[in-house]
Amino acid sequence: MKTKVAIIGSGNIGTDLLIKILRYSETLEVAAMVGIDPKSDGLARAARMDVPTCHTGVDGLLEMPEWNDIKIVFDATSAKAHLYNWKRIRQFSDKRMIDLTPAAVGPYLVPAVNFSDHLEALNVNMVTCGGQATIPIVAAISDVVKVHYGEIVASIASKSAGPGTRANIDEFTETTSQGIEKIGRAEKGKAIIILNPAEPPLVMRDTVFTLSEMGDKEAIRENIRAKVKLVQEYVPGYKLHQEILFDEIPASNPVLIQGLGYRHGLKTSVYLKVTGAGHYLPEYAGNLDIMTSAARATAERLVKSIQS
Amino acid sequence: MHPIGHQYTKEQVKELAIALDRAGVDAIEIAHGDGLAGGSFTFGFGAQTDWEWLEGISEELTHARLTTLILPGIATMEDLEKAKNMGVDSVRIATHCTEADTAIQHIEGAKKLGMDVGGFLMMAHMNSPKNLAEQAKIMEQAGADCVYVTDSAGALLMDDVKDRIKAFKEILEPSTEIGIHCHHNLSLGVANTVVAMQHGATRLDASLTGMGAGAGNAPLEVLIAVLNKMEVSHNCDLYPLMDIAEEIVRPLQKRPVRVDRETLSLGYAGVYSSFLLHSERAAQKYGLDTRAILEELARRGLVGGQEDMIVDVALDMIK
């Protein structure tokens, strides 16, 4: 029997997640699609696909006949709304919450890096789209050498950034930076996000720069490639776009990193491209795809670990 | 900051700020070239932190307002609050010319801090006058005291500037100021600034010798000379500015700030002026022509902040 889940949030992310689970999941069933706008496209789609819907937010969800059987709740609203949603959901100890907002109430979870660390957590946070794309790379380098500094640039198509993202750019940069430190294990993390309005829209790009101690370049390269394969298991459109580059920052000419001081060592540059699966938004929206794919993978692995 | 790769020492910044203040400049912006928190592999690390550059400046100023720059997506409100606590009471908040709504959070936040706020619509040549004015309206409604036409690529011609300023005038409240920020890539930095002023811009950006990205900004000493000849009233003294330009600023330039083949290509192709040094380095490293890289960056529609993509583009070009 499939595990019943609810999705709160009927915007781009919630709707893309809905489509992914309905079409492809062998272990999850969407038992409720929850929004706050009865006219939203996401709720209309859910209704067309015979998914029970509610347009009165988490309060309405708790009144739905399906609520008792739901085991996992995805939150695809906003950081602010998540605080309220979690306050309501946490009263039910048999429910797990997977948070796709940058609220970061629960521990950060990047499936390719630390899934098994949080099997018991009632609320896990999916960091950000840029975090899902880049933290695995920083973590792969940290497996080999001590990383002083991890910097990432996420470029996304303007069309793929919904109102929630636009109103909360700081939450993206802050949450991603913290994820680089906590999960990527860089001493200092920095995240940059760029919205590009080009037509046709540009596919999501992510660049990772790290400054680490000098180390075995071949081992770093191999570890990054292996990590890319792990991410590809749940995000097929995730790819290295260029060869991994190395530069040496000599002790005689160190760089001044704000909040860290002068550092030297090995600079590693990794250029990634994330092509979306084209479910709710077209293929350029890799940012959407990597978030919903990571959330779906987390839920499916959770179900598997609970059942075994 | 850009022509010297953000390598000013804090002593140089202080010396210049005091000299500009004494010469009657109304506002002085201090930050990494890509705004607060711009120090990075992507944009280049500074010789000092933002806080080292800003420290002890506000106390020295007798006339000029101390201002700074942030780009949402790079710096956060936390950075701005820190600057505010160091005596910065004015800020320019910059977005690409179509993405004004990503700055609402910061404009509102800066107003709550009691700061004077300028909205900075970069790469203004990539949006029509009407649509650019609508973006300006979003910034005004968030609380901006002034909105700038920011010609980051130095690609606007004089009529293009006129049309954008007029579109702003039509849609913005009379109490909202209009600003102009030019780059000199087509040698129109001063001319475009004057055109903007003649159509209602009251905040005019300029820097000594044009010290700024690409072929530089409108050169301040030249602009003041022109304004003097036009008998426009302002607070600046021309000769001290000419002296500081020659004696302090020009000797700092490692790469000359001028219109040459590469910087002209920025304006001609419509590329973010700060891409210049990054593109020249990539051209040298991968045996490519700088102009060819710049044309490819324009073809792909890359916007300010995408400096990381310059090496990526160069690697694609040699594939």
Image (tube, rainbow, N blue to C red):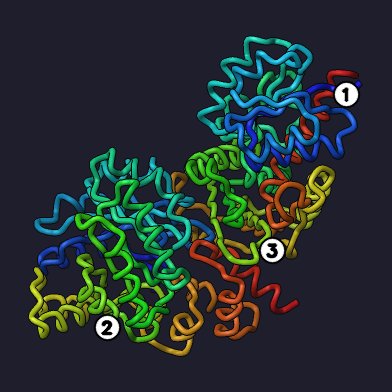
Kind of residue at disc 3: Leu
* Cα gap from disc 2 to disc 1, whole angstroms: 69 Å
Q: Residues within 10 Å of mark 1 (few under 14, many from 20)?
A: few
The x, y position of residue B30, in whole percent, is: 29, 58
Q: Which residue is mark 1?
A: A2
Using the image as rendered, state which of residue B23 and residue A291 is in the foreground.
Answer: A291
Q: Residues within 10 Å of mark 3 (few under 14, many from 20)?
A: few
The x, y position of residue B138, in whole percent, is: 38, 52
Q: Which one is earlier in the sequence, the residue at label 1 or at label 3?
A: 1
Numbered circle sitting on residue A245: 3
Q: Is residue B150 left or right of residue A92?
A: left
Q: Which residue is mark 2?
A: B191
- Do marks 2 and 3 share a subunit? no
Kind of residue at disc 1: Lys
Which mark is nearer the camera, 2 or 3?
2
Q: Is residue A30 left or right of residue B192?
A: right
As drawn, B10 above or below B230: above
